[in-house]
Image: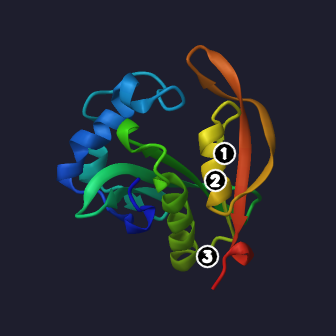
Amino acid sequence: MPNSEHIHLRPVTEKDLDQLERLHEDPAEAGDHGFFGFRNPGQLRRQWADGFLSAQGGRLVIAVGDDQFVGEVQWHEVMQGPASPCWNIGICLLTAERGKGYGAQAQRRLAAYLFDHTKVNRVEASTELANIAEQRALEKAGFTREGVLRGACFRAGAWRDMVLYSTLRSDQTA
C-alpha cells in the first residue's frame, strides 16, 4: 500500500483536466456515491479557464509521488448565520486510488490549509449515510460526526440521507 504521507495538494493545471473530467463525467470512475448525472461537456475546462480558486471556494488536485494525479478536493462557502461563513468540503478520488488512505490525509490537509489561509472557524463535510468508507476517512481526518440530515441529497432517482461532519479551528493541533 502506498504511503499516504506523500500526498500533496496543488492547483489544477491544464494537464489535469482529462483526469478531472473522468472523475465527474464517467459514471464508472465517479463510483456509486459520486455520479450525479451527466454534465455540460467542457464545463470543467471553461471553469478552469476562469480559475478554480476564489474567495468563495475552490478546488485543488490531490497528487502523490512525482505529482501523479489521484483525485481532487473542493470547498465552497456556506453561511451558518448572517455573519458566520464556514467551508463545506468534498473529495473525489480515482477508483484505482481509493482505499489507500489518501482521502483522510487530503481532507486533513485541506482543513489545515483553509484554517491557515482564511478566517473561518468551521470546516464541514457531508456524505451519504451508505458511504461508510468516506465516513471513516472523515473521522480519521479528525472530523466529528454531528448527525444525519434526512433526505438532503438527490442522486440516482432518490432522496438520500446525509451524515454531517465538522472540524473547528480549535480542534486543530499545533
Amino acid identity at mark 2: Leu
**Residue 88, percent from left and from top:** 60, 53
* Residue sitting at x 78%, y 37%: 149
**Residue 145, percent from left and from top:** 77, 51
- Res 3 visible: yes
In this rendering, position of residue 133 left or right of residue 25: right
The answer for how far apart the CA atoms under marks 2 and 1 are is 5 Å
Of residue 45 and residue 102, the one placed in the foreground of this image is 102
Q: Residues within 10 Å of mark 3 (few under 14, many from 20)?
A: few
Q: Earlier in the sequence, mark 3 or mark 2?
A: 3
Which residue is identified by label 3? 119
- Residue at the bottom extreme of this rendering: 174
Instruction: Judge whether 63 appears above or below 23 on screen.
Output: below
Which residue is identified by label 1? 135
Which residue is identified by label 2? 138
Amino acid identity at mark 1: Gln
The kind of secondary structure element at disc 2 is: helix
The answer for how far apart the CA atoms under marks 1 and 3 are is 26 Å
The kind of secondary structure element at disc 3 is: loop
Q: Earlier in the sequence, mark 1 or mark 3?
A: 3
**Residue 150, percent from left and from top:** 79, 31
Instruction: Judge whether 148 appears above or below 103 on screen.
Output: above
Residue 95: numbered disc: none
